[in-house]
Amino acid sequence: MPVPSASAPRILILLAAHNGAEFIAEQLDSVLAQEGVDVEVVVSDDASTDGTDAVLDGYADDPRVRRLPPGRFGSAAANFFRLVRECDAEGFDAVGFCDQDDVWVPDKLALLIEALR
């Protein structure tokens, strides 16, 4: 687990999931391994039935991963809207969005923060 840095940008990542058991661990691992930034991930699961919940249980001890209570939202857009509506971004330098089946290169967020600056 990367060590948080007092000077690294803090980024809140909103992850919308639905039946992503096959991919979500690799996605979360790539987000949590980001270099040059401190991340916190909030996951919203849209009524998965494929074991996504069990995969997410494997991250229960990582304080950087938080799960909202599961619900039934019906679309990725509605699930992301729920995340935006229910997550407090105060204290973060940026907010990022990710799907359950992406894999990020280790410097993705650092490069994006630099581009924003």
Image: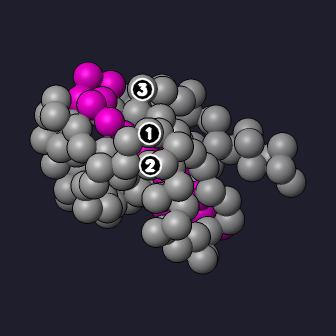
- Residue under the point 48% across and 27% down: 102
Colour theme = one colour
In the image, residue 43 lies at what x, y percent?
37, 52
The kind of residue on which mark 2 rests is: Asn
Disc 1 versus disc 2: distance between alpha carbons? 6 Å
- The quarter of the picture where residue 107 lies is top right
Find disc 1 in the rendering and name its residue: 75
Find disc 3 in the rendering and name its residue: 101
Q: Secondary structure at mark 2?
A: helix
Circle 1 packing at 10 Å, graded few (<14), some (14-19), many (20+), is few
Left or right of 69: which side holds 112? right
Contact, CB < 8 Å: mark 3 with mark 2?
no
Circle 3 packing at 10 Å, graded few (<14), some (14-19), many (20+), is some
Q: Which residues are magenta?
A: 1-23
Q: Which mark is residue 79?
A: 2
Q: Is residue 11 above or below residue 16?
A: below
* Earlier residue among tags 3 and 2: 2
Contact, CB < 8 Å: mark 1 with mark 2?
yes
- Residue under the point 56% across and 27% down: 105
In the image, residue 39 lies at what x, y percent?
51, 55
Disc 3 versus disc 2: distance between alpha carbons? 15 Å
| Residue 2 lies within the magenta run | yes
